Image (cartoon, rainbow, N blue to C red):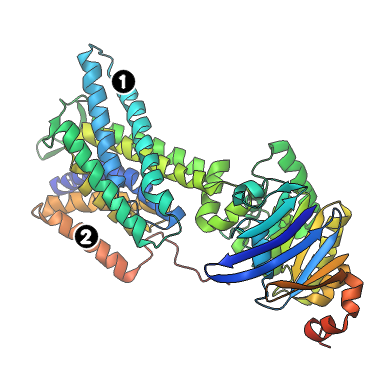
């Protein structure tokens, strides 16, 4: 569904991604793990076209999306839950969700809104509250809900567990699995390698902008080097 | 009522009238600042162009023998709004969009260049002298004590209040309820994220320039009719005043721009009523300095919040 072939990305003179190739198949949960600064978020944002890849090719559903402007890429059936959640703090919960469904009809919006609120009862309780007044966990739920509002075929999640309490992290990972069961393909970037690999079908390890290892979630969990570097021995 | 309070009431009426038009222009500054964090220095010229266009249309229609004044004014309003919006759109396209992502000072300079260009372009096309238009809306409603002081509220002032009220209400509803208004607010908070939702933020930004220009054109028509004269340089001082109003109310805040405009208008009217009128700019800009000293984010502005 998502194919990344030999992608290089630069920030000015600094090269952040080196010849990255990976693939996410339809219906999979694929995770990308790596240390701080390895280029995980850069890869995520490069898929979204911000920044654009300097070379290489990104295909979504067989269609090249590298080179398209960000707004156009994000209308192809792809949605992102970005690093740091980035909910619109001064908009209400409902307005945030509405923004996610910007290009859909009112009926479609209302249908998906109901689905999202069933999945996140907390958001229903706070529907008219400003997003900025909510807790981190609630904001993360809102960010996921907003991404779901466009009915994407694939969701990119960038560190959804960052800074959250363990119990909330559990919930978030359950919801990610639920999304996959509902037919949404998931590409998950995580520092929380243990949790991420447990739910992932396959995983990739990124080091200094290069993919150094890949395999099934279970294989990577057992891998000696991965255990040492990311799972605390 | 005593003479003094009637006199005060009259000044209040005059101040609210000028203040309404400042508020209309100030919205353009505040919306553009809210969305791209930059001041549109060519905005005053858009107001001036709106004024010129309405003069030309009104004089033209009168010359063609049209007599129905409401129809003439509505046609003038529509044409002025349309053409001024096109100018507003062009300013964004020429002076801002190609420079997006560059150092913040650079679009500022290109906007000042745009302002100089537009001013001189009107000087060349229309001459630098005052252009006058005979008063179109006369008559007033007077009250008070004829022996002491008669307060007059002219129909033109009432029209300015009514039109401003309609524009502000429409704008508030648009921003708070409509889909595009929501996108505007989202964009002013996090442009990148709005983009990541598939929304073309360039279009949203262009729209704020267009809305600001349309409201400035409305102010251009109203103030043009109120004063009866226009020249190519009215945009500079009106722009400066409206910018002050926007900062006073809290730049980036739409209700702030409305409030700032009214406060500034009333302050000016009262100052020129009780002191030599040369002091009115001293007092209004002095007020600005005080607000900036004690409340830098303006009356209704949001203080910069640190993101967690």
Give the Cα separation between the discs numbered 2 and 1: 37 Å
Give the letter of the chain under mark 2: B
In the image, is residue B144 above or below residue A74?
above
In the image, is residue A52 above or below residue B238?
below
Left or right? Give the position of B237 relative to A129.
Answer: left
**Which circle marks residue B84 in the picture?**
none
In the image, is residue A101 above or below residue A87?
above
- Residue located beneath label 2 in the image: B285
- Residue at image position (83%, 56%) is A179
Residue B51 position within the rendered picture, expressed as x and y whole percent measured from the top left: 25, 34
Mark before the other along the chain sequence, 2 or 1: 1
Residue A144 position within the rendered picture, expressed as x and y whole percent measured from the top left: 73, 58
**Residue A39: quadrant of the picture:** bottom right
Quarter of the image with the N terminus of chain B in it: top left
Q: Which of B191 and B276 is in front in this view?
A: B191
- The answer to whether residue A139 is seen in the rendering is no
- Residue at image position (75%, 49%) is A152
- Residue at image position (35%, 34%) is B163
Left or right? Give the position of A86 relative to B14.
Answer: right
- Residue located beneath label 1 in the image: B70
Left or right? Give the position of A169 relative to A209.
Answer: right
Helix, strand or loop status at disc 1: helix
Q: Nearer the viewer, residue B38 or B268?
A: B38
State the residue lying farthest toward the top: B65
């Amino acid at each position: 569904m998502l194919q990344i072939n030999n992608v290089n990305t630069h920030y000015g003179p600094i090269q952040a991604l080196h010849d990255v190739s990976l693939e996410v198949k339809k219906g999979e949960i694929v995770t990308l793990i790596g240390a701080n600064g390895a280029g995980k978020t850069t890869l995520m944002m490069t898929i979204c076209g911000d920044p654009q890849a300097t070379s290489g090719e990104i295909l979504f559903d067989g269609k090249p999306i590298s080179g398209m402007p960000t707004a156009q890429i994000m209308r192809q059936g792809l949605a992102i839950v970005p690093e740091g959640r980035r909910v619109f703090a001064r908009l209400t919960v409902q307005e945030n969700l509405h923004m996610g469904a910007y290009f859909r009809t009112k009926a479609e919006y209302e249908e998906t809104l109901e689905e999202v609120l069933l999945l996140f009862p907390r958001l229903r309780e706070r529907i008219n509250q400003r997003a900025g007044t909510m807790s981190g966990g609630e904001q993360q739920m809102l960010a996921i809900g907003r991404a779901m509002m466009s009915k994407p075929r694939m969701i990119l999640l960038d560190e959804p567990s960052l800074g959250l309490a363990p119990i909330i992290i559990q919930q978030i990972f359950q919801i990610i699995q639920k999304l996959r069961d509902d037919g949404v393909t998931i590409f998950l970037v995580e520092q929380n390698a243990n949790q991420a690999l447990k739910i992932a079908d396959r995983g990739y390890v990124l080091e200094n902008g290069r993919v150094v290892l890949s395999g099934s979630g279970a294989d990577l969990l057992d891998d000696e080097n991965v255990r040492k570097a990311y799972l605390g021995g | 009522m005593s003479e003094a309070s009637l006199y005060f009431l009259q000044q209040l009426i005059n101040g609210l009238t000028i203040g309404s038009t400042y508020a209309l222009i100030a919205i353009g500054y505040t919306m553009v600042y809210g969305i791209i964090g930059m001041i549109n220095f060519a905005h005053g010229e858009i107001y001036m162009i709106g004024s010129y266009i309405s003069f030309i249309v009104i004089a033209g229609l009168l010359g063609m023998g049209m007599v129905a004044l409401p129809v003439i004014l509505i046609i003038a309003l529509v044409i002025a709004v349309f053409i001024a919006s096109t100018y507003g759109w062009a300013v964004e396209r020429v002076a801002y969009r190609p420079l997006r992502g560059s150092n913040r000072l650079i679009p500022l300079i290109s906007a000042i260049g745009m302002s100089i260009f537009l001013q001189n372009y009107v000087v060349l096309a229309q001459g630098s002298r005052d252009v006058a238009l005979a008063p179109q809306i006369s008559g007033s409603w007077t009250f008070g004590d004829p022996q002491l002081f008669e307060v007059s509220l002219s129909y033109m002032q009432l029209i300015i209040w009514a039109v401003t009220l309609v524009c502000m209400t429409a704008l508030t509803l648009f921003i708070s309820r409509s889909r595009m208004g929501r996108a505007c607010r989202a964009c002013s908070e996090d442009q990148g994220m709005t983009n990541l939702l598939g929304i073309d933020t360039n279009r949203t930004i262009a729209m704020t320039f267009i809305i600001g220009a349309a409201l400035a054109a409305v102010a251009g028509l109203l103030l043009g009719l109120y004063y009866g004269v226009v020249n190519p340089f009215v945009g500079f001082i009106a722009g400066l005043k409206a910018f002050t109003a926007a900062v006073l109310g809290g730049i980036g805040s739409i209700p702030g721009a409305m409030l700032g405009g009214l406060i500034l208008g009333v302050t000016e009217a009262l100052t020129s009523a009780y002191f030599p009128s040369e002091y009115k700019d001293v007092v209004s800009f002095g007020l600005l300095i005080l607000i900036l000293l004690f409340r830098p984010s303006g009356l209704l502005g949001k203080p910069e919040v640190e993101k967690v």
